Amino acid sequence: MPTLVNYSGDDEFYSGGSCSPYSIASHVDLYCPPSKRARISAPFALEGSFFEQAEKPSIDVLPDECLFEILRHVQGGKERISSACVSKRWLMLMSSIRRTEMPSKSENELVSSGDVEMVAFDQDQELNGDDGYLTRSLEGKKATDIRLAAISIGTSSRGGLGKLSIRGSNSIRGVTNLGLSAISRGCPSLKALSLWNVPFVGDEGLFEIAKGCPLLEKLDLCHCPSISNKGLIAIAESCPNLTALSVESCSKIGNEGLQAIGKLCSKLQSVSIRDCPLVGDHGVSSLLSSASSVLTKVKLQALNITDFSIAVIGHYGKNITNLTLSGLQNVSEKGFWVMGNAQGLQKLVSLTITSCRGATDLSLEAMGRGCANLKQMCLRKCCLVSDNGLVALAKTAASLEGLQLEECNRVTQAGIVGALSNCGEKLKSLTLVKCLGIKGIACGVPMLSPCRSLRSLSIRNCPGFGSLSLAMVGSLCPQLQHVDLSGLYGITDAGILPLLERPEEGLVSVNLSGCLNLTDEVVVALAKLHGETLEMLNLDGCRKITDASLAAIAENCLLLSDLDLSKCAITDSSISALASSKKINLQVLSLSGCSDVTNKSASCLKKLGETLVGLNLQHCNSISSSTAELLVESLWRCDILA
C-alpha cells in the first residue's frame, strides 16, 4: 500500500508501471518505494530504423479543474492516501479539497470503508494522551508545505489534527500560506497552533486557519514578521473559543489586533505579549478590561506601555492569578503604586517583576497590601528595591509563602534578617541569587524573632555572603528542610556547622556545590545529624571532601537516593564503602571528574548499579573506555554517562 513517510528528496517518484517517472526529487517530502521500470509491452510502430512506443493516454493530461472533480469523489482514508502518493500535483490537489466539497458520507463510513489501516506520516506524529488528539511538530528543514499537505490528508480520516507546532522553516522551500491552507482544509478540529520563525507565513495563512479551524483554542506567534493586525482580527472574528494567546517579536501586530481579541474572544484565559513595538496602552488596556471576567494569566514583557496599562491591571484584573511584568521601562513608581492600591488583584497568587524601574520600596509596599492572596513573589534586577521595601513587603503581604530575589543589589543582610523576622508564620521559601549587596555582618542588625515557617533556603552565587552571614540567617530558621548554598565559595566549616545543627525536623536536601573551602568535618556532621532524613546531597566541586566523608555517608544516610561527588578528592575506597553499605540505596550517583576512581571500582559500581538508574562517569580519566563499556552492557537498566 502506498504510504507517505519521511522523504529526504533523493529518490525518484515512479507511478507503478509507468515508463515516465514523476521527477520531484528536489521538491517533495514524500516517498513511494521505487519500482523497477516496466518492460516495454505496448504495440510498436516501425518508422525508418527506429522503434517508437505508442503513447498511452494519461489522466494527467486533464486540467486541475477536472482532476479536482475526480479526486474529491475519492472516499476512504486508504484511497485518499494512495491518490496523494501518485505525484506532487495530486497531493496538492487532494489537500485543497475541503470536507464540505466532498460527497456527503458519514465519518464512520469513511473510516471503516475497506477495513482501512491508517498510515502514520512520520515518527514525530503522536497521540497526545492528555488532550486526546493528534499532535504534530515540524522543525527546521522538515517544515515545508508538502509535509503540511501530507499531514492534512493523513489525519483527516482520523478526526483531524488537534495540535500543530512549526518551529523554524526550510530555507529553500519553507512553510508558506499554502501549507496553512492545506491544514485549514483537512484539519477543521485544530485546537492549538504554534508558529515560530516562519517569515513566509502572512495574514493570508491566518485567514485560512480562521476560516477552516473555528475550534482553535490556543495561538502562539513568535518571530512572524509577515503577520499583522489583519490576521489577528480574522482569528478573533472566527475563533470565539480562543483561550490562550501568545505574541512575541511580531513587528506588525499592534493595538488593533489586541482590541479585536479582547472584544470578541470572551473565553480568553491566558495572554502573553513580548517585544512588539506597535503594542501600546490602547491595545493592552482594551484587552485586559474586555476580557477581565475570565483572564487569569498575564505576561507583558518589553512593551512600550505606561502607567495607564498597569493601573488598568490593578482595576480590572479581578481574576488574574499569575502576573509577569518585565522590561517595562516607561512604567514609573506611580503605576505600580496605583496597581497595588486599586485593590483589584485580590486573586493574584504569583507576581514576577523583572527590570522595571517603577518597582521601588513604596510600590512594593502598596502591592503587598493590595494583593491579599499573594503567595509567590519574584523580583529580578529591580535596582531600586532596598531593605525598607523588602521588610515592608514581609509585613503587608499576609499570605506570602515564597520570596525570590535575583540581582537586587540594594538589599543587604539587614533586609534579609528583617524580612525573616517580620513574615510571621507564613514564609516557607526564601531564594537569593546574585545579590551583591549582601556583604558580611551589617552593624546594628538586631536579632529578632525566628521564622519558624521557613522550610527552604537557597542562597546562590552571592559572593559577599560569608560564614558569619550564614550563621546569622541560619539561627533564624530552625525548621529548614531544604538548603541550597551553591556557589558560596567564601563560606567555611565554621559558618555552615551552626546552620546544620539548627534544624529540628532534619534536612532532606542539601546542595553545597562550588563551596570550595568545606572539609570532611561538615559532611561527617551532616551525615550524623540528618542521616535519617537526608535524600539528596550535592558536593560537586568540593575538592577537600575525601573518603572520610563517604564512610560517614555509607554508615548513616539511610534514605539517600541522589549523591553528586563530582570533582571531589575521593578514591576507590569511597566506592567500596558505598557498595558495602547495607543501609544506603542510591538511585543517582555522579563521579564526574573524580580522577582517583579507577578500574578497581568496576565490581563495586556494578553492585551499586543494582539500584542505580543514573550514573555519571564523565572525565573519570582513570576508568578506561573498555571498563565503561562493560558497565554499560551489564547495567542495562541504568543510564550511564561515560
Image (cartoon, rainbow, N blue to C red):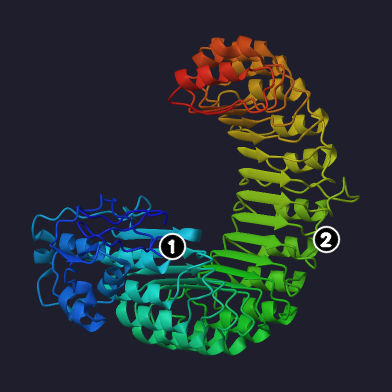
- Residue mark closest to the camera, 1 vs 2: 1
Q: Which of 253 and 538 is in front in this view?
A: 253
Sequence-first tag of 1 and 2:
1
Instruction: Say if mark 1 contacts mark 2, CB within 8 Å.
Output: no
At label 1, counting other C-alpha atoms closer than 10 Å, the crowd grade (few under 14, some 14-19, many 20 or more) is few
Label 2 sits on a secondary structure element that is loop
Report the side of 234 relative to 333 (left or right): left
Residue 241 image offset from top left, x and y in percent: 34, 77
Q: How many labels does the image show?
A: 2
Determine whether 199 is above or below 506 in the image: below
Image quarter (top left, top right, bottom left or bottom right) of the C terminus: top right
**Res. 23 image quadrant:** bottom left
Q: Which residue is drawn at 65% across and 60% down?
A: 378
Identify residue type, mark 1.
Answer: Ser
Q: Nearer the viewer, residue 95 or 18?
A: 18
Report the side of 614 relative to 415 (left or right): left
Residue 453 image offset from top left, x and y in percent: 61, 46
Identify residue type, mark 2.
Answer: Arg
Residue 469 image offset from top left, x and y in percent: 82, 42
Report the side of 360 relative to 321 (left or right): right
Q: Residue at x 39, y 76 (%)?
A: 178
Residue behind mark 1:
26
Disc ID at residue 78? none
At label 2, counting other C-alpha atoms closer than 10 Å, the crowd grade (few under 14, some 14-19, many 20 or more) is some
Residue behind mark 2:
410
